[in-house]
């Protein structure tokens, strides 16, 4: 058995490879004592170690092993650590490389970072610090792999969004993100900030709809001491708090029309004046806005300033709704399951086919409620795989069931024998049928009464119409009374 094979074999310190295991780490150093020291310390912390005495042996083994991190000394006989790093980055750019270096070779370590090394740790090595660096590198590799996998299976609509985010992040242009509630507008804004040169500066969020109109100006631009009642101290606004970073204005369509010119000036001049202050303050802020409204329609209706609209809409990112993202919905469901499984300390490995179908139906129809369903599913799950039984039926299904019951009730009522009706009910039904004929010409109570009397020509119908508040014209009553009297004389 070779040295790498012995190291890969299960031991008391390392879980079996087929079971849950820690990250696999290649430790490369030409000093055997240093390799044993690092291997022992990392094994105790849950890592799986494969030791090598030369860079050439490690490079040859990389192609046949599932390695997560390479830890190598900088100065070694034969292939140096710097050369090994360059070869690993060229052949397997997904594997992070950590360099071990002495204090005297700091400049060389910086050169290694430029060559593609993920990080470096100085000697003498502190095992705890090395373990933290190794774990961070392994998590970085796992995250990059997850992002790559998501991009490969993402819908065409989201592929375009990813490409647009990559292009926008390198600039300071203002961005307008639009889309329905629950489509991830703030997630996109944070991703843009995280990829920009401002990523180490603050990312400040304000929901314009959540702040009262009278307070939003003070919230954005700050206020001076004594500017208004209870202003006992001066306060920095969000523009100043986000100085050097990114300010994200969510629900920009809810901003009052009176405040929009002040925001426009802040964007144009890159200066803000706190409420009650005399001097303006310079700020360096990138602005990202978001809304679920149609701002173009609001501009036409004079409810949003046209000049501000074009100022914030330099780059437009329209997010498609969940129902248009195809398989992305299932990926989102799986991500939410993992997240809430960690939050509630549940062991949930995945979704059954029935649970996935039900969850996809929920996510594509609920917009802003898309987090509710996975959360309830994780809380109620009792097995490692989430089944449909642990996914509660949504309210829409209950409404559908209620509608079905009502329809069945109506069908049963239609087939049941008709109960006896009163004379008053029969009169009203007859009057209603005559109303349909009267409505073609004149839909008034007088016209309806005329139809009734002309149909029956009876004083009885006059009493019927009066009882139901439908009085015929007086001329028709007099005419009908004369005809009734003449009939009685003829009969006599």
Image: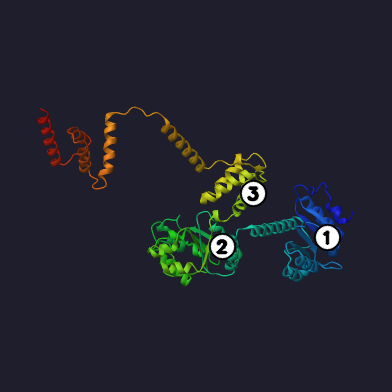
Of the residues under marks 3 and 1, which one precedes in the sequence?
1
Task: Answer left or right for 52 relative to 455.
Answer: right
> Residue at label 3?
338
Q: Nearer the viewer, mark 2 or mark 1?
A: 1
Q: Position of residue 274 (x, y in %)?
A: 44, 65
Q: Is residue 367 above or below residue 73?
A: above
Q: Secondary structure at mark 1?
A: helix
> Residue at label 2?
202
> Residue at label 1?
61
Task: Answer left or right for 420 relative to 462.
Answer: right
Q: CA distance from mark 2 to mark 1?
A: 43 Å
Q: Residues within 10 Å of mark 2 (few under 14, many from 20)?
A: some
Query: What residue is shown at x 83% (from left), y 64% (from top)?
Result: 55
Task: Answer left or right for 20 relative to 35.
Answer: left
The C terminus - image quarter: top left
Q: Secondary structure at mark 3?
A: helix
Q: Nearer the viewer, mark 3 or mark 2?
A: 3
């Amino acid at each position: 058995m070779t040295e790498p094979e012995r190291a890969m074999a299960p031991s008391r310190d390392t879980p079996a490879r087929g079971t849950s295991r820690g990250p696999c780490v290649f430790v490369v150093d030409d000093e055997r004592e240093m390799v044993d020291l690092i291997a022992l310390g990392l094994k105790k912390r849950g890592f799986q170690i494969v030791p090598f005495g030369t860079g050439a042996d490690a490079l040859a083994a990389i192609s046949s092993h599932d390695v997560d991190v390479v830890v190598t000394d900088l100065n070694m006989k034969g292939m140096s650590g710097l050369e090994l790093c360059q070869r690993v980055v060229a052949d397997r750019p997904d594997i992070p490389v950590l360099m071990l270096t002495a204090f005297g070779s700091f400049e060389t370590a910086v050169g290694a970072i430029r060559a593609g090394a993920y990080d470096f740790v100085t000697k003498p090595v502190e095992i705890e610090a090395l373990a933290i660096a190794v774990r961070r590198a392994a998590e970085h590799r796992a995250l990059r792999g997850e992002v790559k996998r998501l991009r490969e299976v993402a819908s065409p609509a989201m592929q375009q969004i990813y490409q647009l985010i990559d292009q926008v992040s390198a600039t300071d242009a203002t961005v307008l993100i639009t889309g329905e509630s629950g489509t991830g507008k703030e997630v996109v804004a944070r991703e843009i900030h995280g990829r920009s040169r401002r990523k180490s500066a603050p990312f400040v969020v304000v929901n314009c709809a959540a702040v009262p109109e009278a307070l939003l100006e003070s919230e954005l631009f700050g206020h001076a001491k004594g500017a208004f009642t209870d202003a006992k101290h001066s306060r920095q606004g969000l523009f100043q708090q986000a100085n050097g970073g990114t300010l994200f204005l969510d629900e920009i369509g809810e901003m009052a029309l009176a405040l929009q010119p002040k925001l426009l000036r802040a964007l144009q001049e890159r200066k803000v004046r706190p409420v009650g202050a005399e001097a303006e303050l310079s700020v360096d802020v990138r602005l990202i806005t978001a809304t679920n409204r149609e701002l173009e329609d609001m501009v036409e209706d004079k409810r949003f300033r046209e000049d501000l609209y074009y100022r914030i809409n330099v780059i437009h990112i329209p997010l498609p709704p969940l129902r248009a993202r195809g398989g992305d919905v299932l990926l989102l469901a799986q991500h939410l399951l993992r997240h809430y499984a960690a939050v509630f300390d549940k062991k949930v490995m995945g979704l059954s086919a029935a649970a996935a179908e039900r969850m996809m139906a929920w996510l594509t129809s609920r917009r802003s409620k898309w987090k509710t369903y996975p959360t309830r599913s994780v809380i109620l799950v009792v097995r490692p795989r989430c089944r449909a039984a642990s996914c509660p039926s949504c309210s829409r299904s209950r409404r559908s069931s209620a509608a079905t019951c009502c329809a069945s009730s109506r069908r049963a009522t239609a087939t049941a024998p008709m109960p006896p009706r009163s004379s008053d009910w029969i009169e009203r039904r007859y009057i209603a049928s005559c109303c349909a004929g009267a409505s073609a010409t004149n839909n008034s109570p007088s016209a309806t009464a005329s139809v009734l009397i002309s149909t029956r020509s009876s004083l009885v119908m006059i009493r019927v119409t009066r009882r139901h508040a439908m009085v015929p014209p007086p001329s028709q009553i007099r005419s009908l009374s004369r005809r009734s009297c003449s009939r009685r004389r003829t009969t006599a």
